Image: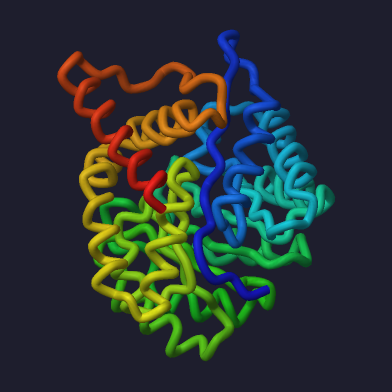
Amino acid sequence: MQIHGVIPVIPTPFKPDDGIDEGSLRRTVDFAIAGGACAICAPAFGSEYYKLDDAERRQIVEIVTGQTAGRVPVFASASAGSVASTVAFSRHAESCGAQGIMIAPPRAVPLGARELAPFFEAVCGSIKIPVMLQDADFAGSGLSVDFFMEAAKRCSNLKFLKLENVLPGERCREILRRSQGQLQVLYGWGGLRLFDGLAHGATGIMPGTGLVDVYVRIIRLYEQGRVPESKALFYRLLPFLVFAVEHLELFIRMEKRVLMKRGVIASDRLREPTLHLDDLYEEQMEELVDLGIHLAQES
C-alpha cells in the first residue's frame, strides 16, 4: 500500500450524555473523504482514545470502516499497554476490514528498545495487514533509526512510520535512505511540521480533520510547483496550529469546534477530564477557529 497526502485523525463526537454520536462520526468520515483525504485514522490520540473503553474503541473501528466502505484506506489505532490487548485490538480491526494498523510504544512505564522490539514483533506477527509504528515521543527524539531498521527486517508488514518528535527531518531522510523504499514516513503533530516533512521526503501528514481541505490544498500547490503560494497559505494557518498544539485537549477541542461550525458534528463536547479555558483564551480560540474556517472557504 502506497500512501501519499493527508491522513486525518477522526475525532470522536459525543452526545450530551457522553455516548458516542454515531451520526456525527459517520458525517465526519464523509467530510474527510470529500475534503481529499487519501486515508483516515481512528481512534488515535486525536480521537480521545485514552477516554474510551475497549468496547467503544471497537465500535468506532466498526463504524469508521463501515462508513468508509473502501473509498480510502482506514488505519485503526490499536495502541494499548500490553501485547495481548494490542493484538486483540489489531485482530478486531483487521476483521472489520481496516487496511492498516497504527501502534505506539506503551508509555505508562518507560521501556527501552530491547523491551519494545519483541512487543512490536509480536503485534506485527499477529496480523497480515500493514502496520504503522507511531513514534509518539512529543518532547524527545524518539526511537533510533537503527531500531526502525531492525524492526522492518523482522516484521515484513511494518510499512509506515509516523514521526512525532523534535526536529525529525534528518531521521526521516535517513530512514528513507536506509530502508530503500520499504518504509514510508508520515508526520504527525497536528500538521505543524508539514514543510519539514515535504522537504525531507515524508509521504504524508496526519493532522486533525476539521481543516483537511486546507492541508490538501497546501500540498497540491506545493506539488504543482507553486511553492510560494503553498507556503503563504500554510503561514496563514500557522497561528491556528501554534495555539492548538500547546495541549492535546486544546487541539481536539479546536478540531471539534471547527467541525461543529462547519455543520459536520452536532457538538464540540470532550469527555472529562478536559482542559477548561478562561474567557480571554476562549476568545482567542474562537478567533483562530474562525480563521481556519475562512481559509477552508477560500480553498
Q: Position of residue 17 (x, y in %)?
A: 59, 9
Q: Which residue is drawn at 58% across and 83% down?
A: 182
Q: Number of numbered discs present?
A: 0
Q: How are the colours assigned in the image?
A: rainbow
Quarter of the image with the N terminus is: bottom right
Q: Which of 60 and 256 is in front in this view?
A: 256
- Is residue 193 visible in the rendered image? The answer is yes
Q: Is residue 282 above or below residue 171?
A: above
Q: Tell me: residue 234, above or below residue 209.
A: below
Vertical placement of residue 231 versus 208, above or below:
below
Residue found at x 56% / y 57%: 36
Where's residue 151, x and y in %?
A: 56, 74
For the view shown, which residue lies furthest in the top direction? Answer: 17
Where is residue 263? Give x, y as percent. Answer: 53, 28
Residue 100 horizontal side relative to residue 280, left or right: right
When asked about the image quadrant of residue 89, the answer is top right
Identify the residue at image location x=78%, y=51%. 91
Judge by depth and name the residue closer to the eye, 64 or 249.
64
State the residue in front, 181 or 227: 227
Q: Residue furthest left?
A: 280
Residue closest to the eye, 215 or 278: 215
Q: Position of residue 43 (x, y in %)?
A: 59, 41
Q: Quadrant of residue 152?
A: bottom right
The residue depicted at 43 percent of the width and 74 percent of the height is 202
Mark yes or no: residue 112 visible: no
Taking the view exactly as shown, the residue that stands out farthest to the right is 95
